[in-house]
Amino acid sequence: MRLLSLLSSVGAFSLVLSQTTDATAQSGNACDPTDQLACACSEAGVADVNATVKACFLGDVNTVTANQADNFSTQIFSAINWPVKLDENGRAIAGMPDYGSKLEGDWTTVWETWKSTNSIFRRDAPPIAWNETDVPLPRACAQLDLKAEMAKVSYADRIPNVMQPRLLDEYLNPEGRAFLDRNGRPVRYDVIFNKQAYEFTTSNNLWDAKSLTDYLDENGQLELPAGTWNTKDIGPERGAIVLKSSWMVMDEIHDPDLFHKAWAFVSPIIMDGKVDHGCALEPVALIGLHVVYKTEQFANWGWGTFEHRHIAPLWSEIGSTTGGVYPDGRPVPDWLFYSRDSGGAATLNAQPKHVTEGIPSRITSYYPPGYYAEPIGKSLTCSPTDQNFWCFNERLHEGFSQAAFKNYVLKGTQWELLNSGGKLIPEILGNTTMESFSQETSSCQTCHSYAKPDIPGSKRETLDFIFSFNRDVLKPSVPVQGQ
């Protein structure tokens, strides 16, 4: 109750932002369309779909409040999930949104052409160039006949195929555990940098252990670029954005229209508790997305997290849904990671056994989206700029009503209250697909504050909350680590 009261007072003075006026305020520079700053859409005459679903978003908010943080997260989510522009050969152009595209069906998104950390941190090899969408693959993947493998999938024509399939070789979550689907196959994870984070890394040679060590010796710590509202004489600037995505290998039971889909090289192959160090081309569904952004107002990053709405029920929902319907008559979804027995009963969740035992995970969602914000109940109606948390997700659903992205929701945004001595709003936040077994204790910023060199005496936050610089550069490890 103390947290809710605090948020009520914080939310009371939050400002409702209209991107129409924001675009005007930020139109003082020639915006790079790949940055998707508000002025780029203004100059191109690109209209907003609604107050949440837009092709462009601000460089920063003017003041951080609960409503502005969640508003910012959902606008970023909608913009980076915009269809990517294709070249004359029908292939994706890295980082370039197709501002004239219709939001119908499914497509390759802008962020999927950003750089995965497995294309940046390549041991002794330099990063893959930003504009290069094809990357070197493990031998077992490179030998696959893609056309033949795709032909095995009945809905292959509904899976975007405008760039090389992504490589998904990480299968342990940050807790060091596997999150197993109903087939006993682990969810896969991938960390992605936007252009600003990528260029900061490459321009300072931070992919190289010696260069990173020298940089830390000289500067003390990393400080990735921060987005700005409107820097004097320059205009708005985009800051670093780091994503973590979670993907489920699809089977013949899944309805492909419910998901954003992609082709992926999955390695190693894990099925029925058996590990094969080969590679398979699989259709995969996006089930979770951490959207982490750095701005002047979010100096310690804003931590937004999204997930598919059918992951798992709330624990409180289990007993009331044994008949397959909610009390109000709505049908209960076919949960992706939760199954009732024949009598509708459930037992308390337990962490899964080792991935090689192949026992599917059985989880519930610890809290509903927006549990920390007031009011938490659904509004009867949402005005075009209503700041009720539920309305952000309602507008996501409306704006993507003809697309697979209508099935994704904002779970919440964690941020640090200014001049509070580190007070986090909310104190607990986790994604059901990533912090699956620690949702009741998970804290995004608190966890990532331990991003530091793995050497005695290293200070917390030395690596600017980004684990990849230690895990993938200073202390390279096998890719199954999920952080």
Image (cartoon, grey):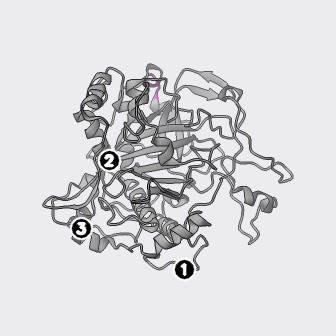
Of the residues under marks 3 and 2, which one precedes in the sequence?
3
- Amino acid type for the residue under numbered disc 3: Ser
Query: Where does label 3 land, which residue?
Result: 42
- The residue tagged with tag 3: helix, strand or loop? helix
Is residue 389 among the parts visible in the rendering? no
Q: Which residues, given as a range, are shown in magenta?
A: 141-145
Residue 244, given in percent of the width and then of the height, sits at 46, 43
First in sequence: mark 3 vs mark 1:
3
- Which quadrant of the rendered structure holds the N terminus? bottom right
Picture disc at residue 290: none
Q: Amino acid at mark 1?
A: Thr
The one of 107 and 6 positioned closer to us in this rendering: 6
Give the spatial CA distance, label 3 vs label 2.
Answer: 22 Å
Mark 2 or mark 1: name the one nearer the start of the chain: 2
Circle number at residue 240: 2
Q: Quadrant of residue 473?
A: top left
- Element at badge 2? loop
Q: Real-space Cα distance between discs 2 and 1?
A: 35 Å
Q: Position of residue 47 (x, y in %)?
A: 31, 70
Q: Gap in Å between the C-alphas at discs 3 and 1? A: 29 Å
Q: Which residue is mark 1?
A: 381
